[in-house]
Image (cartoon, rainbow, N blue to C red):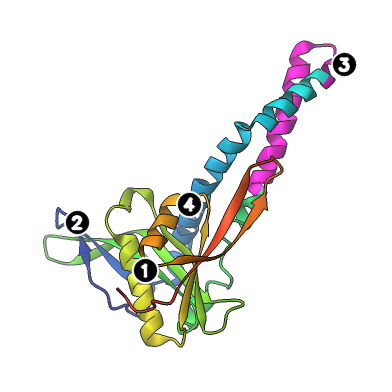
Amino acid sequence: MEPCPAVKTSILKTKSGRTSYRIRNFSLSDRSDIQRLCTEERIEILVPISRACFRNRFTFILLLLCIIVSMFIFTRLIVSCMIPSIVITAFLSYRISSLKHKIKAPFQHSYIEYTDKLSRRRILVAVTTVEDDDDVMHEQDIVGFICFSSHPTERQSALITHLFVTKKYRHEKIGHILLQTCRRIISEETQYQHLHALCSGYQKDGYRFLLDHHFFISNSWTTCIFVPGITDEQKMLSTTRIAPL
């Protein structure tokens, strides 16, 4: 693994005392792990959107109308039922999958900029470490990360575009440590005065987490998915408390 600047942080240990978590700066060798976590994050958002779309009354009415129309076109009943179902399913799947680049906007910069311009943008990763019989710590898996950069429109402001911890480790206070470390870095090493975070309306746990850490909603907007009543509400949350609490 490539060397990277150290991040001063406390080591968080599990109850067993054998596994702990280390917060460090992102290195280029972590790219595949970050992409894996980004995919996991998007899936957690897209799955409830998909369920809501396919359980919507409008979808069933549209499907029924299409089946009735197709019965006048095709002579075989099974074809009349299958074709509308396939077409509507394919269309909704396309609309939902096309949101993956709008939901939780991808990184604003190339990975190399997150390693070369640490004073302006940075990715912090949470890595599980295991202590062997010789008291030597070994890194294992990246289980969470936080990404922040300069806000595209607000002056002297940082924007957290991603804060994600894989489901298995969400009760280990990793998200809290990541956010606290991010706040400390912004307070001590940058000129940013304000901190913002972007959150999807379908990330209910993440939304509550940010509210618990003194963020408040400063802006919101919705993205339509063609099915009436089904939208993804993007929330911009802000805080003036930069220093760790």
* Residue at disc 3, secondary structure: helix
Q: Report the disc number at residue 43.
A: none
- Residue 148: give x, y in percent of width and height: 48, 72
113, above or below 38, in the image: below
Q: Which residues are magenta?
A: 69-97
Q: CA distance from mark 4 to mark 3?
A: 44 Å
Predominant secondary structure, magenta span: helix
Find out whether the residues at labels 1 and 3 contact each other: C-beta distance under 8 Å. no
Q: Nearer the viewer, mark 2 or mark 3?
A: 3
For the residues marked 4 and 1, what is the alpha-carbon distance in whole angstroms?
Answer: 17 Å
The quadrant in which the C terminus is found is bottom left
| Badge 4 amino acid | Gln
| Residue 230 in which image quadrant | top right
Tag nearer the camera, 4 or 3 = 4
The answer to which of marks 2 and 4 sits earlier in the sequence is: 2
Q: Position of residue 169 (x, y in %)?
A: 31, 52
Q: Tag 2, which secondary structure?
A: loop
Task: Please give the residue where the numbered disc 2 appears in the rendered image.
Answer: 14
> Label 2 is placed on what type of residue?
Thr
Q: Outermost residue, right direction?
A: 73
* Residue occupied by mark 4: 203
